[in-house]
């Protein structure tokens, strides 16, 4: 099975994602959310119509070692933490072991709490953040925090990277390090999906990324990237992910945040304000941005370089597909639904809305959440903004339509939201879906071929 993507307008979606940090985006919520219905409370994994790929759960301890670990964690948390731990146990999340090394959520929480963390990080703070996130993944946010005065000089020096006496660079740093709106919506959406669908793997990531080692290893199946092993290796090399390969079936990848992420994580450990990212969010989103941006992300500025994207914010569709595929070790496809011309004008759709709806519903029925990229247009149908959200379920309406239940990491709302199908479907630019959903409907181009062709096109444009 190949991880494949349909032909998409890379230049146009670069333009879309680049507008995430523009002035027009500050009014996004006034327009886009005006017709949205909000659910009254967070939706748990047990709520009807919300599918989940979490294996059958176990809510009772089998070994004394498990009991001891649980008792230890209870003794290290406050009243709210104990309540959340009890919830994780009762819902089967705590003993879930759907991780790359078969370690459970409990195993990794225990490591976070009882072993050394990276310099400047608090094991207790990370423990609480991870517990809270797994109990309610809707608290994951992409909202950056401010840089307090006591960290500002260090942040500027890190930005200058050895050129601290360069006044021009220092002046640039003063503007660059104050991120008012982040471009990590793809990374935050993947983080949410991992926390909700693979809680043990999420906890394992947090443990490794926050450890003195500062990284996490993951063994993936190469055929989840391409049919041909050499093509899969081409992708790994193109994205510059450190890896080891001992056979033609699997590779061990190393994921790590960028070199500036630890300072941001330290700041959020001690100076986190309401609705800002947690330390866990910082480490996870930096790592996911590194994977997708060919190891070129900078947490201080929320900017990236890399060979596949002409824009310095966010991740494009091809990068998002690769990141999802290796992080989840699943064959992920990205299909583009909107037709966009060279002037970033929406001119039509690749398929009808009923087919689009069918694709999403089939993926949900398979237990897969669906990360989508939506667009907003001006009165002339020119795309002015793009953003990523996650569809997690549906709700039937009396009029025969459905509402898509979604999570948005950029709305400051820590619970699911609902979009009517007539409102959302016309706005969907692309969606990440299992191959089985699209096999009979769409003709695909191999992921590595699409990436190579897009890279060549960008090089020609720049020449």
Image (cartoon, rainbow, N blue to C red):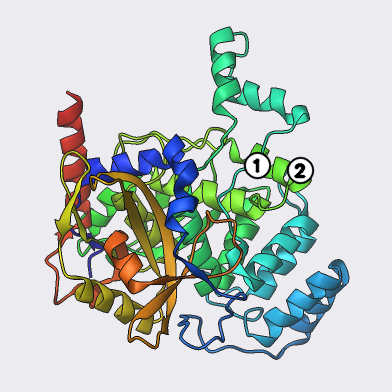
Quadrant where the N terminus is found in the figure: bottom left
The mark total stands at: 2
- Label of residue 145 in the image: 1
At 79% from the left and 83% from the top, the residue drawn is: 67
At 31% from the left and 59% from the top, the residue drawn is: 427
Query: In front here: 365 or 161?
Result: 365
**Res 90 → quadrant:** bottom right
Q: Secondary structure at mark 2?
A: helix
Asked if residue 443 lies left or right of residue 27, the reply is: left
Q: Position of residue 418 (x, y in %)?
A: 46, 71
Query: In front here: 345 or 326?
Result: 345
Quadrant where the C terminus is found in the figure: top left
Q: Residues within 10 Å of mark 1 (few under 14, many from 20)?
A: many
Q: Secondary structure at mark 1?
A: loop
Q: Residues within 10 Å of mark 2 (few under 14, many from 20)?
A: some
Asked if residue 149 lies left or right of residue 330, the reply is: right
Q: Position of residue 34 (x, y in %)?
A: 47, 60
Q: Is residue 282 above or below residue 96?
A: above
Dot 2 or dot 1: first in sequence order is 1
- Label of residue 372 in the image: none
What's the CA distance linking mark 2 and mark 1?
A: 8 Å
Farthest residue to the left: give it.
Answer: 443
Q: Position of residue 109 (x, y in %)?
A: 70, 67
At 54% from the left and 18% from the top, the residue drawn is: 172
Q: Is residue 153 above or below residue 450?
A: above
**Res 150 → quadrant:** top right
At 21% from the left and 39% from the top, the residue drawn is: 455
**Are the residues at dot 2 and dot 1 in contact (C-beta closer than 8 Å)?**
yes
Q: Is residue 183 visible?
A: no
Q: Position of residue 403 (x, y in %)?
A: 40, 77
- Label of residue 271 in the image: 2
């Amino acid at each position: 099975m190949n991880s494949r993507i349909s032909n998409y307008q890379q230049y146009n979606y670069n333009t879309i994602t680049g507008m995430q940090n523009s002035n027009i985006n500050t009014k996004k919520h006034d327009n886009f959310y005006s017709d949205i219905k909000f659910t009254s409370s967070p939706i748990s994994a047990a709520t009807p119509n919300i599918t989940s790929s979490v294996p059958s759960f176990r809510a009772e301890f089998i070994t004394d070692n498990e009991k001891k670990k649980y008792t230890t964690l209870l003794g290290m948390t406050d009243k709210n933490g104990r309540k959340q731990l009890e919830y994780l146990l009762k819902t089967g999340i705590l003993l879930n072991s759907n991780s790359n090394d078969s370690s459970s959520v409990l195993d990794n929480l225990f490591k976070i709490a009882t072993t050394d963390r990276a310099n400047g990080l608090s094991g207790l703070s990370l423990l609480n953040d991870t517990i809270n996130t797994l109990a309610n993944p809707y608290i994951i946010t992409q909202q950056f925090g401010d840089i307090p005065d006591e960290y500002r000089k260090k942040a500027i020096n890190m930005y200058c990277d050895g050129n601290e006496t360069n006044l021009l660079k220092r002046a640039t740093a003063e503007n660059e390090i104050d991120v008012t709106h982040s471009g990590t919506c793809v990374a935050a959406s993947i983080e949410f999906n991992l926390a909700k669908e693979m809680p043990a793997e999420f906890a394992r990531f947090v443990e490794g990324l926050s450890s003195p080692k500062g990284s996490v290893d993951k063994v993936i199946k190469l055929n989840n990237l391409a049919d041909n092993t050499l093509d899969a290796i081409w992708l790994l090399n193109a994205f510059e992910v450190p890896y080891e390969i001992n056979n033609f079936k699997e590779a061990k990848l190393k994921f790590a945040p960028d070199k500036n992420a630890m300072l941001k994580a330290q700041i959020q450990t001690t100076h986190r304000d309401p609705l800002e990212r947690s330390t866990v969010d910082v480490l996870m989103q930096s790592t996911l941005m590194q994977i997708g941006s060919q190891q070129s992300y900078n947490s201080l500025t929320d900017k990236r370089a890399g060979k596949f994207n002409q824009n310095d914010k966010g991740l494009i569709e091809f990068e998002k597909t690769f990141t999802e595929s290796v992080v989840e070790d699943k064959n992920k496809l990205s299909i583009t639904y909107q037709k966009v011309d060279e002037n970033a004008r929406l001119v039509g759709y690749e398929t009808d809305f009923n087919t689009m709806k069918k694709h999403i519903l089939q993926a949900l029925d398979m237990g897969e959440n669906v990360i989508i990229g939506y667009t907003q247009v001006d009165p002339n149908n020119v795309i002015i903004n793009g953003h990523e959200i996650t569809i997690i379920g549906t709700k039937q309406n009396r009029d025969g339509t459905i509402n898509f239940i979604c999570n948005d990491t950029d709305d400051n709302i820590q619970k699911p939201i609902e979009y009517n199908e007539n409102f959302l479907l016309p706005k969907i630019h692309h969606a990440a879906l299992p191959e089985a959903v699209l096999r009979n409907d769409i003709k695909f181009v191999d992921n590595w071929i699409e990436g190579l062709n897009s890279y060549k096109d960008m090089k020609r444009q720049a020449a």
